Every structure is written in C-alpha cells, then in structure tokens.
Image (spheres, rainbow, N blue to C red):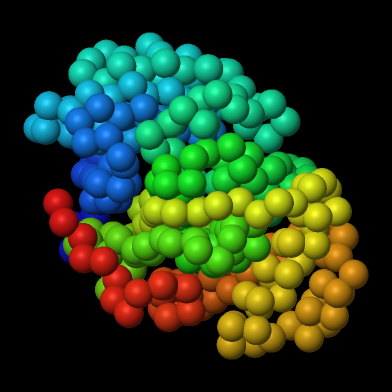
C-alpha cells in the first residue's frame, strides 16, 4: 500500500514531501476557512508554527481560489523561523508571510490573536514525555491554549491537529473546561489511503517511537467554530487541577484502568501528571500491536467526543 509521508528516496524531493503534507492538510484548512466571516481575504495566525508547512496548503488555495492570505507564524524557536523565512517565502509566493519570535505561553501577541480571521495550532506538545522534556511543558501548553481561547473573538475558528488520538482527548477535555457550554466544534480523523494503520503498518527507520511516526502527523483534526472562554483566574494550580480532571475523565475510557494513578490524581503534582502522560502514551508504545491499539483509541475519540453522529466526510 502507498505511503503519505515516509520513505522519500532523496532529500532533493523536499517539494514532493511538502506537497503531500499540504494535500493531507487541505480538507482541514478548507473547513477552517469555511467558518471564517471573511470569504476571500484571511488573516491567518499560526501558533507555535515550527516549520510552517501549512503555508504550502494556503499557497494551493491562493492559486486555485484566488484567495488572499496574510499569514503570521509565531514560534519560540528562532531556527525554525529562519527556515520559514528563507524557504517558505520562496515556495509560497502568493501567501504574504510574516514570522515573529514569540513565547506564546508567557508573552502572547494579543493584538494578533484578537485580530485573526482564523487560528491554526499544529502538533501541541501536551503529551511529550521523553526524559529531556521538562515537566512544566504541559503547563505551558495549557497557558498557550488559554491565551488563544481568552483573546480570540468568539466566532473566530481554530484548527488544532494532533498526531495521536489520546492527545486530542486531552485537548478536548481542557477546551471543555475552559469554555462556556455553547462550545461548538467538529472532530475528524484523516484516514485517507496511505496513512499508517494496522492495514498499512509503516514506520520510517528514523521513527523509533511509534508515537512519533511522521505518517501520523495532523491525523486528528479539531475545528472549533464557536467558543467563549470562562471567567477564570488562571495560574499554575488551576492548570494542574484542570489537567488532573482531564486525566481522570480519560483514563477510565481505557481497557485497563490504573486505580493507583487515579487515586494519585486526587492530589495532583507535576510528577503525577507526568505519570499520567506516560501511562497514556504507553497504551500505544508498549502494545504488541501499536497500530491496532491506536485504531482502538481513535474509535474511543470519535465515539466519546464527537458532537455530531457522524465524522465529517473529507473532501479534497
């Protein structure tokens, strides 16, 4: 079976990989833009943009639809921003691009958030658990999410994409805690031909951890179409409590419920939260059949978190 992202024969084929990333993102970004008030000109804010390959998707739309995009990418990593400025501005000349160095957690660009037509956040790192990852990173992710929800306009749509279904569960649990009850969203799992799955078990040799199989990038797609943030005085303790509550909701949905961990979550610490992150990740990582296990978690995600009865069909 064919692949989407992996096993490229030559580094010179970056443009081919670039196009495949663009193609996989096209349905999600079209859904995002379809919920904007503007219909032909868009101010797109990318949060923690990294290497902003979504720009090539906007380039496809700019050429085919004659839409105008003012794209602003924010990231704390200066090397990624340098890559974007030097390469993506050349490969996507029809998208007006601007990149700013910004710590989205501690110093968010509030005017850009409040003035955006739509907001994009690909691959948040709520569940990064490698030893070198600080335990406070998950709190930074909560702060970024809150900064977006607090400062954007109510009807400005947000697209959040994740590699894995259990991370999207956590994102949705937090969004539901941070937003009023009139929250509206659509949830999609991209299962186009070529995605890694139990029928198509592709792992690139460089992807030693099945959780970081590049073939899974952007597969879980959340478009928030309406949300009003609650009146909360956010701080470290509130985020720790919110995360513990989210894990307490997610863990019982798994086949094997960790009773001791659930007990510890009643008095959460950063160490307990890291234990919960590792436990969730190990549902896939330690499985003898990680693709089958991942497929099961995708089913849980849709069955328990989708607002409508059916997944929105993908259109390319």
Left or right: 276 as drawn, with respect to 77 = right
Left or right: 265 as drawn, with respect to 198 = right
Furthest-right residue in this view: 267
Residue 56: horizontal and vertical position, in percent?
26, 30
Residue at image point 49% right, 61% down: 183
Residue at image point 62% right, 75% down: 250
Q: Nearer the viewer, residue 173 or 273?
A: 173
Q: Would you place residue 288 above or below residue 212 in this image? A: below
Q: Quadrant of residue 177?
A: bottom right
Residue 31: horizontal and vertical position, in percent?
27, 50
Q: Nearer the viewer, residue 261 or 245?
A: 245
Left or right: 127 as drawn, with respect to 271 = left
Q: Would you place residue 152 above or below residue 126 in this image? A: above
Q: Give the mark count.
A: 0
Figure quadrant of the N terminus: bottom left
Q: Nearer the viewer, residue 290 or 269?
A: 269
Q: Quadrant of residue 203?
A: bottom left
Residue at image point 32% right, 79% down: 309
Furthest-left residue in this view: 64
Q: Is residue 54 visible?
A: yes
Q: Is residue 144 visible?
A: no
Residue 281: horizontal and vertical position, in percent?
61, 65
Residue 107: horizontal and vertical position, in percent?
69, 26
Left or right: 217 as drawn, with respect to 243 = left
Residue at image point 90% right, 70% down: 267
């Amino acid at each position: 079976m064919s692949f989407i992202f992996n096993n490229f024969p030559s580094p010179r084929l970056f443009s081919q990989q670039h196009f495949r990333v663009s193609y996989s993102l096209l349905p999600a970004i079209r859904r995002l833009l379809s919920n904007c008030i503007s219909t032909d000109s868009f101010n797109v804010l990318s949060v923690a943009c990294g290497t902003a390959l979504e720009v090539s998707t906007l380039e496809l739309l700019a050429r085919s639809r004659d839409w105008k995009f003012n794209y602003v990418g924010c990231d704390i990593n200066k090397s990624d921003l340098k890559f974007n400025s030097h390469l993506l501005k050349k490969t996507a000349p029809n998208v007006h691009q601007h990149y700013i160095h910004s710590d989205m957690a501690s110093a968010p660009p509030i005017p850009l958030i409040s003035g955006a037509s739509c907001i994009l956040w690909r691959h948040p790192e709520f569940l990064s658990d490698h030893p070198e990852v600080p335990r406070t990173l998950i709190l930074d992710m909560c702060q970024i999410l809150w900064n977006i929800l607090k400062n954007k306009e109510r009807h400005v749509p947000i697209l959040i994409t994740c590699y894995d279904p259990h991370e999207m569960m956590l994102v949705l649990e937090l969004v539901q805690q941070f937003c009023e009850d009139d929250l509206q969203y659509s949830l999609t799992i991209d299962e186009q031909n070529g995605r890694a799955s139990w029928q198509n078990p592709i792992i690139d040799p460089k992807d030693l951890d099945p959780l970081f199989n590049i073939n899974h990038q952007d597969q879980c797609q959340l478009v928030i179409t309406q949300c009003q943030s609650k009146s909360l005085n956010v701080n470290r303790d509130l985020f720790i409590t919110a995360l513990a509550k989210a894990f307490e909701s997610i863990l019982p949905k798994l086949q094997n419920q960790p009773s001791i961990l659930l007990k510890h979550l009643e008095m959460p610490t950063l160490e307990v939260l890291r234990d919960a992150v590792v436990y969730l990740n190990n549902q896939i990582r330690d499985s003898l059949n990680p693709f089958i296990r991942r497929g099961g978690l995708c089913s849980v995600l849709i069955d328990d978190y989708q607002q409508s009865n059916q997944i929105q069909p993908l259109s390319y």
